[in-house]
Amino acid sequence: MKFPLSWLREHLETDATLETISTTLSAIGIEVEGIEDKAAQLASFRIARVIEAVQHPNADRLRQLRVDVGDGRELSVVCGAPNARTGMKGVLAVPGDFIPGTGITLKLGEIRGVKSEAMMLSSREMGLGDDHSGIVDLPEDAPLGESYVKWAGLDDPVIEIKVTPNRGDALSVRGIARDLAAAGLGTLKPWHVAPVTAAYPAPLHWRIADPRACIWVLGRAVRGVKNGPSPQWLQDRLVAIGLRPISALVDITNYFTFAIGRPLHVFDVAKVSGTELTMRMARPGEELLALNGKTYALTEDDGVIADANGAEALGGVIGGEHSGCDETTTECFIECALFDPVRIALSGRRHDVRTDARSRFERGIDPALLPTALEAATRMIQELCGGEASEISEAGAAPAWQREATLRFARVRDLGGLELDEAEVVGRLERLGFTVTQRDANRVTVAVPSWRNDIAGHGALAQDPSLPADRARIAAEGCAEIEPECDLVEEVLRLGGLDAVPAVSLPVTSAVPRPALSPKQVRAALARRVLAARGMQDCVTYAFMESTVARWFGGDVAALNIANPIASVYDRMRPTPVATLLEAAGRNGSRGFRDVALSEIGGAYRDPTEGVSQLLVAAGVRSGNTVANWASPARSVDVFDAKGDALAVLAALGVPMAAVMLTTDAPGFYHPGRSGVLRQGPKTVLATFGELSPALIAAHDMAGPVVAFEVFLDAIAEPKRRKKGLPDLPAFQPLRRDFAFIVDATVPAEQLLRAARGAEKTLVADVVLFDRYAGEKLPEGKISLAIQAILQPRERTLTDAEIEAVTAKIVAAVAKATGAVLRG
C-alpha cells in the first residue's frame, strides 16, 4: 500500500522526520518497501525569469538568455529550447546540481563562444515526464526564486509498505497513524463525524436473502448530485498512490478505502431495477459485466448484490458496469457492507479479480466502523457533489465482535526474552487501543478493539476433521487459551521495536545433529545419485501435461483434471514421469540432440478413488545411441539398458535381488514384446521397464528407439536394521560348475536360475547366466542356456562324490521346473 506523507499527517500529529517514520514502521512490523521522494532530487531547482532571450551569435538553433535567479543575480544561459522567450518563467539548475533526467551533474561551460552559467530545464530533464519539446513554462504568478518542488507540491514523499495477511487494519492511513502514535511518534488526531440529517425516505432498500452473501449492510441515497471531476487535491491523492481518478463519486469511495480502510460502492439509483437490492448467492448461469469491462461467469459459491434484473456486483470484490455511476448520475446510493472474509477471498481467487476492496475484506475490516463511514462518505459527497441525503436502509445486524484476551506478564519474558515493567506492558496495549478490564499482580485482561480482528479471533488454521472428538475438543480449548495470549505478547514486543527483542539461539538437543532427512528422502537422494552415476541427466519437469498426451500413459481419468491450469496445454496431472521425460527427450531430438539419457525423481498421479493418489517414482528415458568408448562402439539403446537402470536402483536401495521376479505384464505404453515388470512377490510391483510403444514414439515424432523405466520408491520396504556382525568369510574356497541346458524358447531364463539356486541352499551360493544360444544345431523352438553355479563349502572340503550329488540335484531341479535337459 502507498500513501503520501501529507495524508499521514492529517491523521497523526507529529514532527518526526521521514527517516524516523520509515524506520519506526519497519521496527514495529510494518515493512517499508520503498519511498518515492521527488523533492530529494529536485530540491536545489529554483523558479527563474528570462530577462532577455536573443539569437545565439554563432548558432542558428540556440538562444542566448539572461536569467534572473531571484536573489539579485543575473546568469547567462545558452538554451536550445524553441519556446524560450523574453519574460517567461521556468525552472533553473545551477552548476553542481544533479540533473536526474540525463544523469549528469551540471558544470560551468561555454557553448560556441558564449558562457553558459546555468540550465533551464524541461520536464524530462527533471524526471517528471517524457516531454522534452521545450523548457517548462510556468505561470506568471510563480514566485521568483522559490523552490520549484515546494511551489509545485512535489515535496510530499510517498511511502510504500508491505502488510502481512493478518493486519487488515494497517491497510489504511489512519491505521498506520494509530500504530505510529502508539510507538511514540506523535498523537493520533481525533476523527468525529456528525450525523447527516435525512431529507427523504430511502429509494432503495436492502434485503439479505442468504447470510452467506452478507452479514450486515447499510445504505443511503443522495439526490441532486453533480458527478463531475473530483477536486484537484483528491485527484492528487489518488494519483500519488497509483490510482486513476474517474469521477467525484467513485474517487470518494476510493478515498475512504485508503483513508480509513473502509471499502464503499455507489450505485446509480436510476439504473437499478426495482426498489430492492438483495444480498444473495449467484444463480446457475448468471453472469456479471464488471467495472473493469470483463464478464464473469458466476458460481453458486459467489455472493452477489442483485436487483430485480440480476447481479449488479460481486459483493466485496468488484461492482457491475450496468449500475455504475457516471457523469449522468443525479442520485447515487452508497453501499456499506460487511462480508465474510473467506468467501471474499475464494470468490476473488476463483475469478482472478484483484481489487483494493477485496484485499481489505479478505483480511477483515473494522465491523464497528460501518455507521461512521457511511456518515463520513455522505458528508463528503454533499461537499463535493451537492445534494441531499435520504434515510438509512439497513439489513442484517452488527456481529458480536467484542472479545477479551488475557496476558500473563511473565510470558513476555518467557516467550519474547524481554524484561519489561508491568506498567510498560499495560501502557503499550492501551496505546494500541486495548482497554483494561481486569488486572492483578500477575496478569491483565483487556478488551480487544474492533479494528484488531486478528487478536483473539477464531484462529488461522482449521482442525483436521479426522481428529477424534475428544482430541479435537482439547485442541480447540488449548488454542482458545494460548493463541490470544501469544497475540498480545507479539503486540507488546513489536511496539517497542522488533530489533529490541534479544536474539536467542535455539537449544541444542544433542552434540551430534540428528538426521534431517526422512528415510523416504534418503532413498530418493540415493536413487538420484545412482542414476547420475549411470550417465543420466537429472531433470525437473512439470507435474502436469496435456490430457491428450496423458491418455497414452493411462491418464484418461477425470479425477486428474486440473481445475485452474497455468495454461490450456497443462490441464491434467501426469500419470508417470516417463510422460514428461519423453516430451523433454522429444524437444531435445527436434533440436538435433537425439542421444539423451534423462532421469527424474518425482510424482506419478493416480485416481484418488483407487487409494493412493500420488506415488514417488524414479523414472528415466534413454533415446538414440549409447556413448561410444574405447571398449565398445556406440549402439542403439535397448530394453536391457532400461532393465539395468531399474535393477541398479533396486540394488542400491537394498532390495534382495534373489527375491525379485520378472513378469511380462508391463503397462500399455511399453512395447508388448520388449518390456517387463520387476516384482517382489506376486503383488508388489517394484519397477517397470522396456522399449516404448512404436505408436507412442511415432505420436511424439521421434525416430526411436526409446527405452524407459519406472522404479516405485514407495513400494520398496525400508531395509531392516540388523546388528552388524563379523563378515561371512568361509574358510574354504568356492567351486564353480558350468551347465548348459536345452530348453523351450518360451521358458524365461529366470525360472531356470531360480530352480538351480533352490536345488541345494546350503551349498549353492549363487547362480548366474553367462550364455544364450539359438541356432542351426538346436531343434526348432529350442535354445541353450548356460549357467554357472557357485558352490561354497563351509564345514569341510567337498569330495568328488558330494560334488556330483550337488550337480545331480541342480540338473534334476532345473529339469523338473522347466523341462530342460542337459546339453551333451
Image: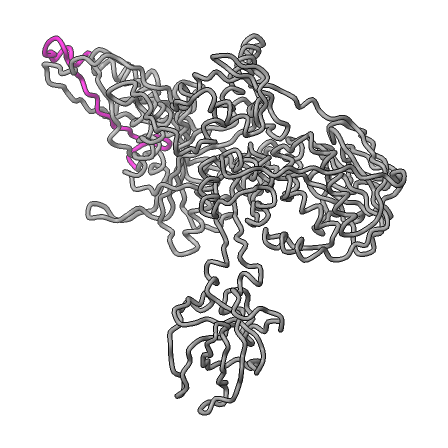
Displayed quadrant of residue 141: bottom right
Decide whether residue 772 is among the magenta residues: no
Q: Does the image show residue 216? A: yes
Q: Quadrant of the C terminus?
A: top left
At a point 29% along the width and 42% down the height, the residue shown is: 535
Displayed quadrant of residue 219: top right
Q: Which of 502 and 790 is in front in this view?
A: 502
> What is the span of residues highlighted in magenta in the rendered image?
776-805
Position of residue 41 relative to residue 792, above or below, is below
At a point 79% along the width and 40% down the height, the residue shown is: 311
Q: Where is residue 473 in the image (x, y as percent from the top left)?
A: 57, 11
Circle count: 0
Q: Nearer the viewer, residue 228 or 822?
A: 228
At a point 41% along the width and 51% down the height, the residue shown is: 588
Q: In this view, does 382 lie to the left or right of 429?
A: right
Displayed quadrant of residue 709: top left
Q: Position of residue 433 (x, y in %)?
A: 58, 28
Position of residue 625 relative to residue 663, above or below, is below
Q: Where is residue 125 in the image (x, y as percent from the top left)?
A: 49, 69
Q: In this view, does 376 lie to the left or right of 559?
A: right
Q: Where is residue 605 in the image (x, y as percent from the top left)?
A: 51, 31
Position of residue 122 relative to residue 153, above or below, is below
Q: In this view, does 719 lie to the left or right of 119?
A: left
